[in-house]
Image (cartoon, coloured by chain):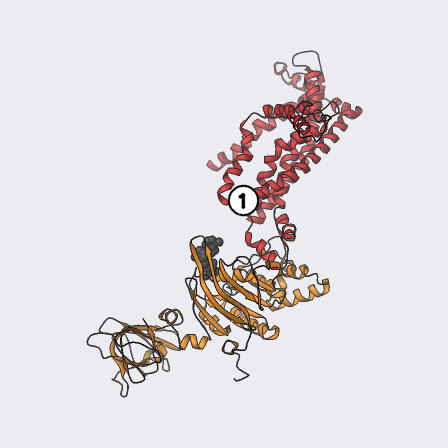
Amino acid sequence: MNQSVFEPWNDPNAKPLIQFKGVTKRFGEFTAIDNQTFDIYEKEFFALLGPSGCGKTTMMRMLAGFEAPTEGQIWLDGQDIAPIPPNKRAVNMMFQSYALFPHLSVWDNIAFGLKRDGLPPDAIGDRVGEMLKLTRLEKFAKRKPHQISGGQRQRVALARSLAKAPKLLLLDEPLGALDAKLRQDTQFELMDIQETTGTTFVIVTHDQEEAMTVASRVAVMDDGRIMQADTPANIYEMPNSVYVADFIGDVTIIEGTATRNGNGYDIAFAEGQPSLHAESEIDLTDGSRAALAIRPEKVSISAEKPENTRNALQGKILDIAYLGNLSTYHVELPTGQIVKAQAANTRRLSRRSFTWEDEVWISWTDTAAVLLEA
Amino acid sequence: MRRVVLIAVPYLWLLALFLVPFIIVLKISLSDYALSIPPYTPKLDFAAGWEGIKAFFSALDFENFTFLTTDDLYWKAYLSSVQIAAIATLCTLLVGYPIAYGMANAPDHWRPTLMMLVILPFWTSFLIRVYSWMGILSTEGYLNQLLIGMGLISEPLTILNTNTAVYIGIVYTYLPFMILPIYATLERMDASLLEAAEDLGCSRIQAFWLVTLPLSRNGIIAGCFLVFIPTIGEFVIPALLGGSDTLMIGKVLWEEFFNNRDWPVASAVAVILLLILIIPIILFQRNEQKQREAEG
Ligand SMILES: Nc1ncnc2c1ncn2[C@@H]1O[C@H](COP(=O)(O)OP(=O)(O)OP(=O)(O)O)[C@@H](O)[C@H]1O
Ligand SMILES: [Mg+2]
């Protein structure tokens, strides 16, 4: 195995830092986390992604020690953490609601955890100074939380959780309230911190791009379950379910019946339309339902019927979304199905080749689409 | 116009219920004792016109206030009242805080019931409640019977007619005034703050000292003033539960009015009492104001 690639989850000898072993969490009748088993490795940057209410915060709170699993165990560093109270865990959490102490200044908020460790005042001062600098809060050190803006509060919460340099850092939507520029800077800052301190990060975010940028692995959650946990590239290129494909990025899903053909399957998706072909390693019985997930950037758009491709369909441009460097074309097939195609805007807007209502051909290669069980 | 009326209402209220009575009391305090009805001179005689008013004002003086300084009974009574009020306030705080804390941490569906229990005593007469304490605390009272019955003591304790009984009475009576503002601040507190404190390495007890207590400060201050201010002038409790050596200004005031029938001296005592109370009242208002600003 290549040493320079950080992929402990593929290394059978790697020892995980966190192990969820059949963890279920119920609130009364409601199941927030549903029998989850997975590992997080040391120095990972593990991102939890999923719709609101899918159980991300609950997962974090179990790691921090504020909720106990209803069933199953969580191991940290080879040890069941159930009996360890939150204040004894080498885990710090940045709360989604920030939970800043309103009676303490920004400085004292950041110093709070350090003081509990009984560090000498000089060391505390230095560390707090470092954190203030990192989060660009030097000017606000003396202010109380209610005297600073929402984004500044978020940075205080981040600084406070970073200050103790914990073994595991839980960040619940740490950058949501920051503007794009500061968010990007902080993302890189987090990655830097991660590299220099070797801290393991578990981060919740609603921002896919953010998850893709910072994470070593992304876990896509739905309804208390992790649907897929993999590298950003794999999640994007090889989603294991329609849900994941649909949740991450832009995608067109075409459903049909599959028939084995060579290295893949032919998908018949509508009367009067040619069947589509996709190479795939999954096992499907002939005639079973399947879904093709096609990323818009893998779909070409042309005026003439392209040669040498099995996947070519004709349709009409319904809508064009201009994204600056790219445009996304929504092409409607005669069946009513809409396929998204993306093209680089190499020419000026006024000289663009296609416009609304144009009849066009869309096409993609045999390996472009991912075949999934429907 | 409507705004003027709206603003005028509280001021008229204040004028009618506070300022006018206060001016009357102040006027009496500047008068002299007399064997008449009412028992003081001079009396304002509008019939005599301008001359009458002038005569009236020239007859007023500060004699009664000077008199208060010559007899050490009065300043001792003031001092003792403040002292008793301060100790009683502290006791009320020590009893009230845990109750408020318990209420704030009780399950949601219990809270209205607990709140009700705190307010419930207000629905019976204050006098009856203090009287019943006499029944509990007297030498043959329920408390002594219970303690003797349990074999904890052999001789009955003398509690009634001592300062201890006064403290018990005050703590009992004013407890809701302490509990409610503290409960209000505790209940508003964000529970995630305690989690954050624990997450950063605090034990439960440390988290209480470093987070809960400072954040309930305003409730504590408000509760203490709400107990302290009325307790200074308290009359019924020391009169019924206290002994002959319980010295409180409310009792002195009562005796001046009704035993000595010396209205001018009694009024002077009341005016001084009010002046003493103004300091904590202003401090209390400041605290409320600051709290509103911090939240606004
Ligand atoms: N203490 C609780 N009692 C009952 N239900 C709860 C409790 N805490 C969370 N839940 C429920 O568990 C589910 C998961 O909640 P959680 O806070 O983990 O969601 P989340 O993924 O963090 O959502 P968001 O992205 O909106 O923050 C939600 O449906 C929520 O209503
Ligand atoms: Mg959440």
Could you tell me which secondary element the residue under label 1 belongs to? loop
Residue placed furthest toward the left: A272
Quadrant in the picture for the C terminus of chain A = bottom left
Left or right: A211 with respect to A366? right
- The quarter of the picture where residue A167 lies is bottom right
Residue B185, placed above or below residue B255: below
Residue A60, placed above or below residue A29: below
Which kind of residue does numbered mark 1 sit on? Ala
Left or right: A259 with respect to B117? left
Q: Nearer the viewer, residue A126 or A228?
A: A228
Seen at 60% across and 55% down, the residue is: A101
User: x%, y% of residue A226?
Assistant: 44, 67
Seen at 31% across and 76% down, the residue is: A284
User: x%, y% of residue B204?
Assistant: 62, 52
Can the viewer see residue A337? yes
Q: Label 1: chain?
A: B
Residue B59, placed above or below residue A187: above
- Chain A pictured colour: orange
User: x%, y% of residue B226?
Assistant: 62, 36
Can the viewer see residue A184? no
Q: Nearer the viewer, residue B51 or B149?
A: B149
- The quarter of the picture where residue A35 lies is bottom left
- Chain B pictured colour: red
Graded by Cα atoms within 10 Å as few (under 14), some (14 to 19) or many (20 or more), the crowding at tag 1 reads few
Q: Nearer the viewer, residue B132 or A365?
A: B132
User: x%, y% of residue B245?
Assistant: 75, 24
Residue placed furthest toward the bottom: A308
Residue that badge 1 annotates: B106
Left or right: A285 with respect to B260? left
- Label 1 CB sits under 8 Å from any ligand 1 atom: no
Q: Nearer the viewer, residue A370 or A37?
A: A37
